[in-house]
Amino acid sequence: MPAGKGRGEPNPGRTCVGKIMAMLCRLREVPRHLLVCEKSNFGHEKSRHRHLVETHYHNYRVSFLIPECGILSKELKDLVMDSGPYYFVKDLPLHELIAHEFINTFVKKGACYALTYNTNIDEDNTVALLPNVVSIDLMDLSSKLDSKKYKRISWAFKEKKPLKFDFLLAWHQTGAEGSTMMSYFSNYRIQERQPKIALSTVTDLPCPVLRSSELRGEPEAACSAQELFEWLGAVFSNAELNNEPDNFISTYCCPQPSTVVAKAYLCTITGFILPEKIRLLLEQLCRYFDEPKLAPWVTLSVQGFADSPVSWRENEHGFRKGGEHLYNFVVFSNRDYWLQLAVGANDDCPP
């Protein structure tokens, strides 16, 4: 008669199942992401490149990479140096953003953007001002300043719930010269800030081989858009691309097929960057190929603020573990482009 198992003895089958369930639970905690890739041409009548740039309102970092380039052209460098300013206002009452004078001075005379600073969207009250549409439509209110709706909102912000925030503000002026942010908010603690600019030349850089017509890549002939996206992340993070066995902290192997370029120019702008400035950069990168170049393509990557309450237009944005919402253009010499849009898994699919 075989001996029975004691109640205290471990059951190998149950132990295995328990480990698998624990592993599955940990996998659920791994942040997931949504990545959309598409291709088009800047000359195509249905190309949506401009719309997607102009409706991604709150941009924190802009980077572009130009292979086979050691010196930045004057046109591009001038645009980079003119990427500011933006403003920081301390303890600004929320009702100031619906004041008659603010709407008439800034909202009606350009594109005005604002975002609360040092607030966490998953923990704090957060406010974002969009140039055309917000949950309270300033353009609609501007024509109804004597309406009951405006008076009710103004009362709520001033008296019932007098909220104050630290704000980042930026303004793209389209009208004649007028008031400035510094003078308008002179009664508050306001600072003018300029974006931080980092320019560098990367030597002997392994670059993926790309074909504009092959978004998904082609075995042994061209890399895919997703492989390029991962490679760009490594380049912008200054990771080693040689996959040496003695460094597993920041190492990455360039996807194949690849080629080594002698020099590549890398520019990164960090601050509160207006969509209008980014559109001009993209247009200038398209014109980069007006004259023959060794580079077969260039890239422009844009990251949004992790704690912005929206990503594109009024699409609600969540943080969870990363707060990602970003896009990347790969501009080819024939004016074809790849567009990659990414958000965290808590967000809706990118537009």
Image (cartoon, rainbow, N blue to C red):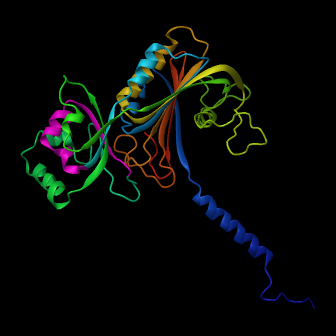
Look at the image and say whether residue 102 sits in the magenta stretch.
yes
Residue 344 on image: x %, y %: 50, 48
Which of the pair 93/112 is nearer the observer? 93
- Outermost residue toward the top? 291
Q: Quadrant of residue 111?
A: top left
Q: Is residue 173 above or below residue 334?
A: below
Residue 43 in sight here: no
Residue 279 lies left or right of residue 237; in this view the side is left
Give the side of residue 95 with respect to residue 249, left or right: left
Occupied quadrant, residue 230: top right
Residue 186, percent across and down? 20, 39
The front one of 138 and 350 is 138
Queried whether the magenta region covers residue 335, the answer comes back as no
Residue drawn at x 34%, y 31% is 85
Q: Is residue 320 shown to the viewer in this render?
A: yes
Q: Quadrant of the N terminus?
A: bottom right
What is the total number of numbered labels drawn onto the structure image?
A: 0
- Identify which residue is drawn at 65% across, 63% down: 24
Vertical side of 78 occupied by 273: above or below: below
Query: In which quadrant is the C terminus drawn?
Result: top left
- Describe residue 132's horizontal placement relative to residue 320 as left or right: left
In the orientation shown, which residue stands out farthest toward the right?
1
Q: Position of residue 221 (x, y in %)?
A: 71, 24
Q: Residue at the spot x=72%, y=30% of the render?
A: 256
Name above or below for residue 231 compared with residue 43: below
| Magenta residue span | 92-118
Rendered image quadrant of residue 82: top left
| Rendered location of residue 238, percent (x, y) | 62, 35
Q: Residue at image x 63%, y 32%? A: 224
